[in-house]
């Protein structure tokens, strides 16, 4: 099976609300694809459509070229973590995985392997109802890995995890991608994907906003921006404005300059006698790049932008 | 106390399902009465004058169905809070647990008394429409049912009280068992299975004993308005048996509610 | 991005066949400790309540008049019989001169039987006021003759193991009614004339309840020209009566009065059903289990995990129904056999025939109880899959099962029978081992009604579940 996810012209409406509106993208093997958008953007709907839990009004969602419903042993081809709290509180962790294994003819020893893999082997016999959120997430991930599938889908895997858990998941995701699997990870917080995602699919209001590799996105977001630290903010702005740059004060002693490279800024300021303590090309975080990218999308207007400084 | 009453009332009132259930108590009672009265006619008696039909009791039979809705409403009132963890919110707002339980009992009793009264009176009215067509006419010795008649009034008021006691019994059982499915099954089994099972008991002594201690059979003795000597237990003592069940359930529930962690 | 070889799963899995699905659902069912306890509770309740019911019924003396000793409680072998032995083949002739028309099924006629003991195999040719001439044997065979009443000539002829009945208006032109085979006939059989009459069922509505009473109904008839004609010449013994009445040992005319019927007894106590009725409480527990097996998955969102692992949802539901039904059947079978073996000796006191597993009806009741428990559990599961809420599902199923039975204690018998025949409560009929005046529906038909409800509910559930979205 080709380890890919192909979403093509997908459209889904629940009653009056359009949840997914003509979405198309592809998830390739060998990398971790972040699936990003605010709450209610249509991420979970897309994943449900992909897993055949809901039926699309239009378009297709294929795994390895097939509809999910047509897969014979789906757990061996696609692993999915949907909702970590979806378990019977009275059933032990091992039994929770065992029935899933049985349903796809997966041998029982594989259950013990994945429990070991996610670090739950010691509590395998305990009722899952007593598990913390972090343990439930690990159990859900164990379920996704049960069939050792080439395609993995994680819906908000870091939700409610402690920092240690976040790091564990980040490393796990990277490792899974490196093994050549296609990994789709959804999140409403871009920061969570920092350091694990190689590729990003950004959606808002059910529509595709961006489909780009992380490297490209960061490169684009940083383009030409320089952060300047100076005690003479007012003077610096005047000088650089006159040179044709766009300048915005971002702090009482800091401005962001767009449209002039560092090589030109330094002599300009030196000539004008404006003292400065530091000048650096800005390396934006993924979060910032994302916010810049989504600035134009209507869906994101309500999100607090966090760029409160007014330009002069 | 007043605050917790208002809080409980708001909780009940704001769930649409509860409104339907409350209306359902009256509607199911009246509909079942319509069915029961339509099925009985003087033609089934040896002679019209020897029917000795207790028309008030017949017209109040609808509670056999109506009580099931009461059980559901009362059980949900408690079990829903355990089901979704709301109980912790409730108890942090009103830490006095006895007061919480007492308020719940007061609110459910109030609702059931109101809707039960509507159902009982509605049943008498619909009985008065249907029964004369089946031969239960004043000419045959069956005057229209009226609350001005002492025994009929007792039967009607008693029926409403019966429903309220069923609600308290359900609330108590649910406080002990805490789970919706388990509580509903337990209460409905207690109510309905004993009358059915008792049809297989042929030993008259056993049968008499069983009827005296079965909450439904004993409690519904309150509906009888004639030939009281044929009842296994008198009307008020019968209702007392049900009250005892409700009291035990509420006390056990109350103790566990205070002692147990939420 | 460097393209790399796509990952291949290292887990070798067999196909997701139906057996795998069954195993998966079974794992689910057995792995929740509470559900196992519910099953145990269902079995325990069935046994305990059954024992209590047996104790509560043990003291009464059904059919204690001796006329039913040794035969199934479904039948009575009473009435008045004047007989003498006949060795070898031969005929018995008589004219029924008069018969009182007290009941459509009052019987007056001739009878040959293996012995005078009640319950022994017999062949009887008779006149009835309402149903003409009949040839009956061994309680179950009933062949119709002409519509004539008394006076009428009747003749029974034994040839080997078969007995043939004839009727005639004048005693010379005979027409054949039919032939029956009798098991276990020795060289000598008892031959004679008899009168019987079923008890009258008085069904009266009084004091807000149905008053059902069984009153003795005396059958009266007179016979003349009574003659036993052996094929082989022999000395005929004197006439004897089965009652205390003295009869002329050489008479050819008789005037008989007989109470009680030979045949079907509609007031019989169904001991087996009584013992097995504890299952009603066990069933309540299984209703809750069947509902929770579905609704907990919806509550927890676990259903989506299930449908991700097995996208063919109809098969999932079918597998779950089979697993639950199978488990409930096994639990039910253990419980119903246990309660029968424990409680039958308690209830088998007195002269009436004991309920025994060697009776196919009893065996059907005991095994049928397990089947009943299984089907009710599956019905609950199906209703739960349709409504998806435990409260609604449990209440619906319990009311459908119980209200018809409760209502029947106060409603007129006809209405009660109708309710018990058309609702899922009809399934309880599988527990009955005899037919009574208040039997609403036959065992298999009643069970079929429940199965039909279950099949429809399961069909709707599968249809709904396939269309279900978040």
Image (tube, grey):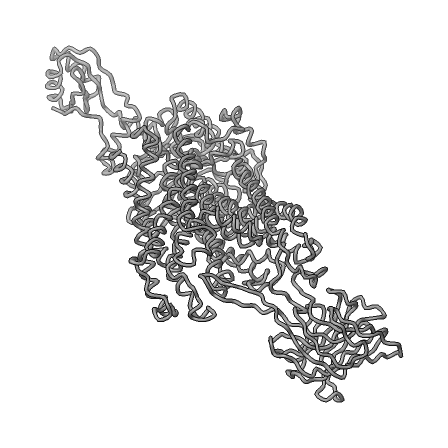
Relative depth, front residue between A131 and C252:
C252
In the figure, is residue C83 to the left or right of C126? right
Give x and y (percent) for residue A217.
31, 29
- Residue at image position (13%, 24%) is A244
| Left or right: A6 as drawn, with respect to A93 | left
- Left or right of C92: which side holds B8? left
Q: Residue furthest front?
A: C246
Image position, residue A188 (x, y; %): 32, 32
Judge whether residue C8 can be spotted in this image: no
Which residue corresponds to the image point at 47% horizontal and 36% vertical from the top-left?
Answer: A88
Tell me the quarter of the image containing the N terminus of chain C: top left
Q: Is residue C437 above or below residue A300?
A: below
Q: Nearer the viewer, residue A257 or A47?
A: A47
Q: Position of residue C423 (x, y in %)?
A: 49, 59
Q: Is residue C14 above or below residue C357?
A: above
Residues C376 and C62: in front is: C62
Whether residue B11 is visible: yes
**Horizontally, is A171 left or right of C30 in the view?**
left
Q: Position of residue C290 (x, y in %)?
A: 50, 46
Return the residue nearer the eye: C435 or C41: C435
Query: How many numbered marks appear?
Result: 0
Quadrant for the C terminus of chain C in the image: top left
């Amino acid at each position: 099976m080709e380890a890919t996810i192909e979403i093509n012209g997908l459209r889904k409406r629940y009653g009056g609300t359009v949840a997914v509106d003509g979405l198309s993208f592809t998830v390739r093997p060998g990398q971790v694809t972040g699936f990003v958008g605010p709450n209610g953007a249509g991420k979970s709907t897309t994943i449900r459509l992909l897993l055949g839990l809901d039926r699309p009004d239009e378009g297709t969602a294929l795994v390895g070229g097939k509809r999910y419903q047509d897969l014979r042993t789906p757990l061996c081809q696609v692993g999915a973590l949907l909702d970590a709290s979806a378990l019977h509180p009275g059933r032990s962790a091992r039994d929770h995985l065992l029935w899933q294994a049985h349903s796809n003819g997966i041998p029982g020893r594989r259950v013990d392997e994945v429990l070991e893999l996610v670090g739950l082997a010691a509590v395998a016999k305990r009722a899952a109802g007593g598990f913390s959120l972090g343990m439930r997430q690990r159990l859900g991930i164990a379920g996704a890995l049960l069939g050792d599938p080439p395609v993995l889908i994680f819906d908000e895997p870091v939700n409610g995890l402690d920092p240690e858990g976040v790091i564990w998941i980040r490393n796990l995701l990277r490792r899974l991608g490196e093994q050549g699997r296609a990994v789709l990870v959804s999140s409403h917080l871009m920061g969570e994907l920092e350091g694990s995602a190689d590729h990003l699919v950004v959606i808002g209001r059910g529509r595709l906003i961006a489909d780009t590799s992380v490297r490209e996105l960061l490169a684009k977001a940083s383009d030409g921006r320089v952060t300047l630290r100076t005690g003479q903010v007012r003077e610096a702005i005047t000088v650089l404005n006159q040179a044709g740059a766009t300048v915005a004060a971002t702090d009482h002693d800091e401005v962001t300059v767009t449209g002039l490279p560092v090589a030109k800024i330094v002599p300009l300021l030196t000539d004008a006698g404006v003292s400065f303590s530091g000048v650096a090309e800005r390396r934006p975080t993924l979060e910032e790049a994302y916010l810049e990218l989504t600035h134009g999308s209507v869906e994101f207007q309500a999100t607090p932008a966090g760029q409160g400084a007014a330009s002069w | 106390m007043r605050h917790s009453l208002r809080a409980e009332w708001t909780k009940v009132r704001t769930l649409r399902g509860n409104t339907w259930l409350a209306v359902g108590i009256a509607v199911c009672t009246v509909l079942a009465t319509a069915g029961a009265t339509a099925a009985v006619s003087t033609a089934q008696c040896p002679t019209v004058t020897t029917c000795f039909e207790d028309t008030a009791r017949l017209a109040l039979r609808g509670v056999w169905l109506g009580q099931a809705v009461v059980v559901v409403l009362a059980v949900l009132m408690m079990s829903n809070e355990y089901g979704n963890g709301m109980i912790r919110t409730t108890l942090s707002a009103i830490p006095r647990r006895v007061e919480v339980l007492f308020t719940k009992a007061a609110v459910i009793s109030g609702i059931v008394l109101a809707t039960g009264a509507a159902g009982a009176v509605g049943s008498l009215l619909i009985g008065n429409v249907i029964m004369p067509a089946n031969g239960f006419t004043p000419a045959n010795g069956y005057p229209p049912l009226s609350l001005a008649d002492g025994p009929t009034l007792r039967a009607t008021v008693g029926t409403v009280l019966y429903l309220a006691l069923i609600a308290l019994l359900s609330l108590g059982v649910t406080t002990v068992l805490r789970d919706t499915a388990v509580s509903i099954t337990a209460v409905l089994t207690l109510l309905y299975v004993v009358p059915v099972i008792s049809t297989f008991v042929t030993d008259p002594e056993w049968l008499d004993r069983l009827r005296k201690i079965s909450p439904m059979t004993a409690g519904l003795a309150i509906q009888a308005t004639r030939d009281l000597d044929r009842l296994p237990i008198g009307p008020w003592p019968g209702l007392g048996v049900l009250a005892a069940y409700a009291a035990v359930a509420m006390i056990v529930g109350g103790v566990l509610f205070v002692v147990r962690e939420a | 991005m460097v393209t790399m070889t796509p990952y291949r799963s290292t887990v070798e899995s067999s196909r997701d066949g139906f057996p795998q699905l069954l195993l998966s659902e079974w794992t689910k069912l057995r792995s929740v400790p509470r559900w196992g306890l519910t099953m145990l509770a269902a079995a325990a309740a069935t046994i305990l309540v059954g024992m209590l019911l047996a104790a509560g019924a043990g003291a009464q003396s059904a059919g204690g008049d001796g006329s039913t000793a040794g035969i199934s409680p479904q039948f009575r072998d009473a009435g008045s019989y004047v007989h003498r032995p006949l060795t070898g083949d031969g005929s018995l002739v008589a004219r029924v001169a008069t018969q009182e028309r007290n009941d459509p099924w009052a019987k007056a006629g001739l009878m040959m039987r293996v012995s005078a003991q009640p319950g022994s195999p017999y062949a009887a040719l008779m006149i009835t006021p309402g149903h003409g001439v009949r040839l009956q044997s061994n309680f179950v065979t009933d062949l119709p003759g002409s519509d004539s009443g008394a006076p009428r000539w009747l003749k029974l002829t034994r040839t080997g193991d078969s007995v043939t009945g004839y009727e005639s208006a004048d005693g010379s032109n005979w027409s054949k009614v039919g032939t029956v085979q009798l098991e276990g006939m020795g060289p000598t059989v008892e031959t004679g004339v008899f009168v019987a009459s079923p008890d009258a069922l008085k069904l009266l509505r009084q004091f807000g309840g149905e008053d059902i009473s069984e009153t003795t109904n005396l059958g009266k008839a007179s016979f003349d020209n009574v003659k036993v004609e052996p094929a082989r010449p022999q000395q005929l013994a004197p006439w004897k009566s089965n009652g205390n009445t003295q009869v002329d040992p050489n008479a050819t005319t008789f005037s008989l009065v007989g109470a009680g019927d030979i045949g079907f007894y509609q007031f019989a106590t169904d001991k087996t059903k009584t013992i097995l009725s504890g299952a009603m409480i066990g069933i309540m527990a299984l209703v809750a289990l069947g509902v929770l097996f579905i609704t907990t998955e919806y509550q927890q969102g676990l259903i989506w995990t299930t449908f991700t692992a097995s996208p063919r949802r109809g098969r999932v539901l079918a597998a779950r129904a089979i697993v639950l039904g199978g488990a409930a059947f096994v639990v039910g079978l253990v419980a119903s056999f246990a309660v029968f073996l424990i409680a039958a000796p308690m209830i088998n006191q007195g002269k009436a025939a004991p309920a025994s597993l060697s009776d196919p009806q009893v065996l059907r009741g005991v095994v049928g109880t397990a089947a009943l428990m299984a089907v009710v559990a599956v019905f609950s599961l199906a209703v739960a899959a349709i409504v998806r809420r435990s409260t609604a599902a449990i209440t619906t199923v319990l009311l459908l099962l119980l209200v018809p039975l409760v209502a029947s204690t106060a409603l007129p018998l006809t209405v009660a029978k109708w309710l018990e025949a058309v609702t899922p409560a009809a399934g309880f009929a599988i527990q009955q081992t005899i037919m009574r005046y208040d039997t609403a529906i036959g065992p298999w038909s009643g069970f079929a009604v429940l199965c039909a409800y279950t099949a429809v509910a399961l069909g709707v559930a599968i249809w709904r579940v396939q269309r279900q979205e978040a």
